[in-house]
Structures are given as C-alpha cells and as structure tokens.
Amino acid sequence: MTGELLIGLYIFILSIFLGFELIAKVPPTLHTPLMSGSNAISGITILGALTCVNSESPIANYIGCAAITLAIINVVGGFLVTDRMLKMFRK
C-alpha cells in the first residue's frame, strides 16, 4: 500500500468516528432543522468522492463510489425530511 492510500484510509476512518459522535450528540428537536445544513456538507462529500474516483488506485475508486452512493442517499433523504418538516407548518 502506498503512503497516500494509507493517509486517505486513515482520514476516511477518522471521519466515520467523528461523524458518528457529532450526530449522536445532536438532540432530536434540532435534528430535523440541521438536516438542511447537512445537505450542503454532503454536497462537499460528493465532490471529494469524485476526486477519489478519478485516482489511479482501484481501492480508492471503490471507496469513492461507495462515498458517492452514501452521500447521494444522505442528500435525497435530507431533502425529503426537510420538505416533510416544512409541510407540517403550512396551513
């Protein structure tokens, strides 16, 4: 394994733990309003994943494809939850 791949894998694993800890600390009353903010973060994740897919390493390509898939699911789910929340406030 090259050093660049190990650093990328290390950052990926740390981001998983950091994301879990951040989401676990958000109270349920704030989770839905913050979902629209997480959509912007997922958009940035998609750009980073596209960079991984463009690399020459096959492992980075697979990780990038998985990241794109998960980020798109997160963006679509976030928009659906935000839309549902906004419909609750309509008369």
Image (cartoon, grey):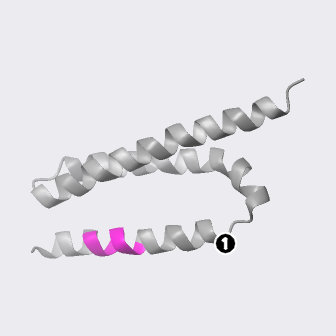
Point 15% across, 60% down: residue? 59
**Figure check: 43 above or below 29:** above
Give the quarter of the figure containing the N terminus: bottom left
User: Main SS type for the magenta part?
Assistant: helix
Amino acid at dot 1:
Lys
Judged left or right of residue 60, residue 14 is right
Which residue is at a point 67% across and 72% down the rendered structure image?
25
Q: How many marks?
A: 1
The 10 Å Cα crowd at callout 1, few under 14, some 14 to 19, many 20 or more, is few
Give the labeled residue for mark 1: 25
The quarter in which the C terminus is drawn is top right
Residue 89 image point, x, y percent: 85, 33
- Measured as percent of width and height from the top left, residue 43 is found at 47, 44
In this view, 12 is above or below 77: below
Asked if residue 58 lies left or right of residue 35, the reply is: left
Q: Position of residue 17 (x, y in %)?
A: 46, 74
Whether residue 57 is visible here, answered yes or no, is: no
Q: Is residue 34 left or right of residue 63?
A: right
- Name the side, left or right, on which 40 lies relative to 73: right
Tell me where residue 79 appears, x and y as whole percent: 59, 36
Secondary structure beneath dot 1 equals loop
Which residue is farthest right? Answer: 91
Q: Residue at x 30, y 75 (%)?
A: 10
Residue 49 highlighted magenta (yes or no): no
Q: Magenta part of the protein: which range?
A: 9-14
* In the rendered image, the vertical position of residue 59 relative to residue 51, given as above or below: below
